[in-house]
Image (spheres, rainbow, N blue to C red):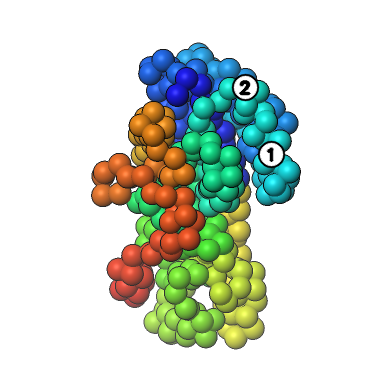
Amino acid sequence: MKRIAVFTSGGDAPGMNACIRAVVRTAIYHGIEVYGIRKGFNGMISGDFYKMESSSVSNTIQKGGTILKSARSKEFMTREGREKAYEQLKKYEIDGLVAIGGNGTFTGASMFSEEFGIPIVGAPGTIDNDLYGTDYTIGYDTAVNTALDAIDKIRDTADSHERVFFVEVMGRDSGYIAMPCAIGGGAEIVMIPETITSVEQVINTLKNGWERSKTSFIIVIAEGDEEGNATQIAAEVKEALPQMDARVTILGHVQRGGAPTAADRLLASQIGIATVEGLINGKSDVMAGIVNSRLVYTPFKDTINKKKIINQRFVRMVEILSI
């Protein structure tokens, strides 16, 4: 392993730069040349490579986003696109890859590794925390704290104006952001893809609270909830409870940005080191993660296909604490 390359792909997440920094400096520490690939798989196909030095990642650990940029590539999902990428890797004499991203990134990386024999180790970079094989993903802690800070501010307005706020957070397939935000933000209801909470249940909860003279409510909704998005759910509730002043706030991409928390910087640094040392030790087609404070390498096929189950105790906590 004389020369490796690192890239970020898919949605950006706070802490990706800390991970890139750890990859670059770990490679240099072990006497390995390291190249950065700009714009994910698209950059791999077009040959957008550049040699990175220790100074290339100076003053980056605290920055959000990704200095390597990111993109989703339709061309890489074709055999022809992957062949172009392989030719570029051969041109630059790349012996191994570090892929920082989520499910889609690892799906592409796994196919690529299988077809062309390129060793690839992944780093879980996604705010959704939905990857099997790690307790936490890079960017998750920051996203939760960003969303929670917004919910705290919304709570002030909800209380002042006696309103019901439907707050939509990211989580197309997962309630990992919504659940801690609901508990930490004192929400009365949380709606996530992993559990079934009907609009009728929401209406009954609000009605019961109103009858107990409760005048403000926060409902946290993951964008992928089976009942619909926050706007749809709020419209149904307004129709059933016209006496309540209901408002919708969609936090959106604000959850992706900002300086990573200390927890995300530490996690990203640990995993960045683990990806390079995994390549050195012959690992491939795996994701590096931390489970129960221990470093583990999980095959991409398991990371992609196995479901990461949300802690059901959290669901009960919301029920108990929202009374």
Task: Locate residue 71 relative to residue 167 in the image: left or right.
Answer: right
Q: Position of residue 52 (x, y in %)?
A: 55, 18
Element under disc 2: loop
Residue 323, compared with residue 257, is above or below; it is below
Q: Amino acid at mark 2?
A: Tyr
Q: Are marks 1 and 2 in contact (CB under 8 Å)?
A: no
Residue 172, compared with residue 315, is above or below; it is above
* Residue drawn at x 59%, y 80% as measured from the top left: 237
- Closest to the observer, 292 or 89: 89
* Residue drawn at x 38%, y 52% as measured from the top left: 133
* Residue drawn at x 38%, y 18% as measured from the top left: 30
**Label 1 environment density (alpha carbons within 10 Å; few <14, some 14–19, many ≥20):** some
Residue 177 is marked as none
Quarter of the picture holding the N terminus: top left
Q: Amino acid at mark 1?
A: Glu
Q: CA distance from mark 1 to mark 2?
A: 14 Å
- Closest to the observer, 19 or 41: 41
Visible in this render: residue 156? no
Residue 153, compared with residue 98, is above or below; it is below
Element under disc 1: helix
**Disc 1 target residue:** 83
Residue 109 sits in quarter: top right
**Disc 2 target residue:** 92
Q: Position of residue 165 (x, y in %)?
A: 54, 66
Mark nearer the N terminus (1 vs 2): 1
Visible in this render: residue 32? yes
* Residue drawn at x 53%, y 30% as measured from the top left: 6
- Closest to the observer, 135 or 27: 27
